[in-house]
Image (cartoon, rainbow, N blue to C red):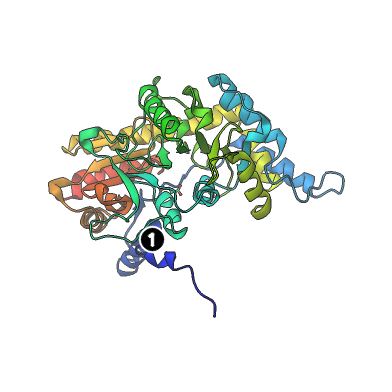
Amino acid sequence: MALINENYLKLQGSYLFAEIAKRVASFKNENPNANIIRLGIGDVTKPLAPAIIEELHNAVDEMASAETFRGYGPEQGYKFLIQKIIDMDYNPLGVSLEDDEVFISDGSKSDVGNFQEIFQTANTVAITDPVYPVYLDTNVMAGRTGYYKADGHFDNVVYMECNAENQFKPDLPKEKVDLIYLCVPNNPTGTALTRTDLKKWVDYAKENQAIILYDAAYEAYIQEEDIPHSIYEIEGAKDVAVEFRSFSKSAGFTGTRCAFTVVPKSVMAFTQDGKTYPLNALWNRRQTTKFNGVPYIIQRGAAAVYSPEGQKQIRDIIAYYMANAKIITEGLQSIGLQVFGGVNAPYIWLKTPNGMDSWSFFDKLLSETHIVGTPGAGFGPSGEGYFRLTAFGNRESTEEAIVRIKTKLII
Ligand code: MLT
């Protein structure tokens, strides 16, 4: 008799963005002529930059000839990409890394979801509330949590509430935790943490022999000086933190798939009898067993991000999305809505008007303006009463969305 992993049965409903897609499809079915503007899932709309496309073409051509054809590549990624990441993303920050401390992957969602596998289920996990659902759901699947409770939380998880009162910055847990998920700049609230904020977390992790799983997928959107681009800018972080980065939002690879995870060899966790063990070796073992690497062609495309033209082109695209963020922020503020985020992140986090619950606001926005956003409650109970809009739309539809909100939304 094949038994299932019953932890899956503890999960609530469907994955957030699958639920939104289902609701939008049903609305579209009933309103086939509605011109829907999608500012829900954080998917990019700009095509890949020309420098990336050119390099993808070159790499495709190499696959057509026996001399340059590539089969299996290194599971950890090609050195030509890893070295560029180290030289251009980390060395300028004063962070040195060895090439076997960077693992190329097909996405931060999969890496951040898979990484928990190398920890014992008895570990206590701390997440923010609201939170990117992958951190929580993958720990539920692994059996690291208890059951879902009436208050919208799972047992045996430490939730760090983020709200307007604490400027959406999590406070240190009062209890001892082992694994801490931080997303900076934050999805969904758009909040970023300063050096001083982050130092507290690194110190906490050191004191408590905890590990920080630091999701920096939106790092390229940081605009302000005092926001670190990597957790390794903070002294001591190389002993306690794993960093996840992605080309999805920085260079439009949401469909092309390429990301990387940094696991310094100095990050140690413990065996039951107290011996230290490097996470780098465990992650390498996991990846070489379960993953065959990102396609060569895609890694060549990602490497082109670091060429002078690639850098300029992706910076222009990021500036374009951040101009959308400004349009959304100012448009919402002009009708009296309270707005957060949108400064160091492509997400705008707004307080729903008149204390409306966030799924009701989702339905109202969709039916009155034909705009899709993401209800804050989908990210956790503390997201209730909030709503997320993304700046990843094209300029026309972003402007049109604001016109519709100003003229059609009844508040
Ligand atoms: C989001 O909308 O939160 C993101 O697109 C999800 C993701 O990157 O997986």
Name the residue type under label 1. Ala
Is residue 174 in view from this perspective?
A: yes
Q: Compared with residue 225, is residue 323 higher up or lower down, i.e. above or below? A: below
Count of marks, rendered view: 1
Is residue 308 in view from this perspective?
A: no
Q: Quadrant of residue 160?
A: top left
Residue 192 in the image, given as x and y percentages of width and height: 36, 31
In the image: residue 231, left or right of residue 147: right
Q: Compared with residue 52, is residue 387 higher up or lower down, i.e. above or below? A: below
- Depth check: give the residue in front, 221 or 269: 269
Q: Compared with residue 227, is residue 176 higher up or lower down, i.e. above or below? A: below
Q: Secondary structure at mark 1?
A: helix
- Depth check: give the residue in front, 329 or 400: 329
Q: Residue at x 23, y 56 (%)?
A: 151
Residue 383 in the image, given as x and y percentages of width and height: 26, 47
Q: Quadrant of residue 92?
A: top right
Residue 32 in the image, given as x and y percentages of width and height: 34, 66
Q: Which residue is mark 1?
A: 21
Residue 336 in the image, given as x and y percentages of width and height: 15, 37
